Amino acid sequence: MFRYVMIDEYQDTNQAQFEIVHQIAGEHQRVCVVGDDDQAIYSFRGATIRNILEFERDYQNVRSIRLEQNYRSTTRILDLANAIIRNNRKRHSKDLWSELGEGEKPELLTYHDESDEAEQTARQVLRLHHLGVPYSQMAVLYRTNAQSRVFEYAFMQRKIPHTIVGSLHFYQRKEIKDLLAYLAVLANPADAESLLRIVNEPPRGIGQTSVNRLLAYAGKAHINLYQALQNVSAVSEINSSLQKKIGEFAAKLEEWRQLALQAPVLSVVKEIMAHLDLVSLYKKSQDPQDISRVENLIEFVGSVSEFSERWSEDHDKPALLEDFLPFVALQTDMDRMQESADSVRLMTLHNAKGLEFGSVFIVGLEQELLPHRMSMDNQESIEEERRLFYVGVTRAKSRLLLSYAKCRRLYDTFYYTKPSLFLQELDSGLFAGNTDSADLNPAPRAKPKPRHRITEKDKQFRIGQPVWHSEYGRGIVLSVDGTGSDARLTISFASGKLAKIIGTFVSTEAPE
């Protein structure tokens, strides 16, 4: 029936689509596909790069036409893109070129931490805007949705209009709204809307029927829903086993409410997170969206930690829940402001595919972010992460700024980062200014001679060594990454907590 078949974006097809096309066109062989194997970044959706790489094996007398002229980017941006992607083994060889002129060399910028990176990026955006670049011609690209938070905050502080593409603003995401609802109930038990949101989130067996009976009881007794939960034993329509579940939930809420009156908000949030075990709940899922939820929750704790530090510096006392919630309310109010057509686009590298901007910022170019920590266990995954970087670079028309932070907050602890493997592979001459190649290649590439090999005896910290942390107490070192006081330690604490902490934050002796 179909005598000719033409397929666009062939690198994004899956196995089922391949079989369908092969059955349609396998006999007459009149098939034309267009695609770029260097932009195959959707394996998590089931796409397979095999289809485009092996097209010449699947069909007879194939004619390949390389479309290497690029009509978007200047030559120096394409030089960087070509240098990045040449490190992939599984690809069709090609080199992009352009007639748009040499243009500016890409810049590589190093910042102290993620907040510094966001603040300086915001300053760069304002500088470019004052030079006449429309906000809509600027984009900030990152690997994970959780990274948007610090940029949203920095842009809001400087009143830079911005739009989150393909996602919600940080404080509007489902898992963050759930956690904020817990905090809202602790601050105001009469907040029925927030309480209804969390009464069975995460699932604890309290269904809508039970909730309706609690609401009916509250109406008759002229009390609010929180008080009805505390007095669930008086609700005869609810059986005893369910009364026990509801009673345990109500008791925990009241315990946290009392805690929030005097304990620092960071301690309250960590206590709630630990009890609900939300991170483990989402980590059990194979859904990439749930992995993103884990990253958002960890980033939320980071945001509370960051706020608490600023508050303590300004007020010389710990930040309480009543101090934190107005800050969050301000963020969420700003999120609801009508988005301007002329606004900076903030998005993940995946969402940037197919788009183009005059000026592009690619941020967070660190090991475990890009390549992502969950994509570092095999060569195929690393090559897809490299393709993702390549896609981001080729979104830029005339100006490209890359950056990474030397230190990053994870949960409520800072750790030292390493520049992305993909940066370490590049010649510093591809970048503007005096990019220090030592910064990009922190470890020697040559295999060290045996006499220089680092052993456990060379390290300041050793596996099995007892250590002490000011907050977590006594612990045992399980692994050591590095040699000096800045080594990254994995520690098992007596409380049952497992944490990765920089050596400078622990002591080898317990306090007197």
Image: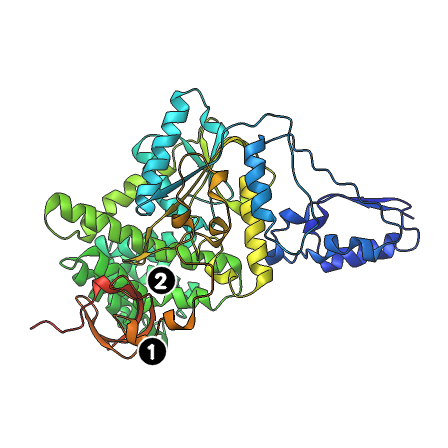
Task: From the image, tell me which residue sits under label 1.
Answer: 240
Q: Position of residue 79 (x, y in %)?
A: 57, 38
Name the residue type under label 1. Answer: Ser
Q: Which residue corresponds to the image point at 44% horizontal and 34% vertical from the top-left?
A: 432
Q: Nearer the N terminus, badge 1 or badge 2? A: 2
Q: Position of residue 206 (x, y in %)?
A: 39, 68
Q: Which residue corresponds to the image point at 87% horizontal and 52% vertical from the top-left?
A: 25
Task: State how the image is colored.
Answer: rainbow
> Is the residue under label 2 in contact with that under label 1 (CB below 8 Å)?
no
Q: Which residue corresponds to the image point at 59% horizontal and 58% vertical from the top-left?
A: 44
Q: From the viewer's side, name the closer residue of 148 and 142.
A: 142
Q: Quadrant of the C terminus?
A: bottom left
> Is residue 228 at least partly visible in the picture?
no
Task: Tell me the number on the disc at residue 199.
Answer: 2
Where on the picture, by quarter, is residue 456?
Answer: bottom left
Q: From the viewer's side, name the closer residue of 60 and 441.
A: 441
What secondary structure is found at the residue carrying circle 2?
Answer: loop
Task: Tell me the number on the disc at residue 67.
Answer: none
Q: From the viewer's side, name the closer residue of 41 and 234.
A: 41
Where on the picture, by quarter, is residue 413?
Answer: bottom left
Position above or below: 276 against 194: below
Label 1 CA crowd tier, 10 Å (few <14, some 14–19, many 20+):
few
Which marked residue is nearer to the observer: mark 1 or mark 2? 2
Q: CA distance from mark 1 to mark 2?
A: 18 Å
Label 2 CA crowd tier, 10 Å (few <14, some 14–19, many 20+):
many
Position above or below: 491 against 48: below
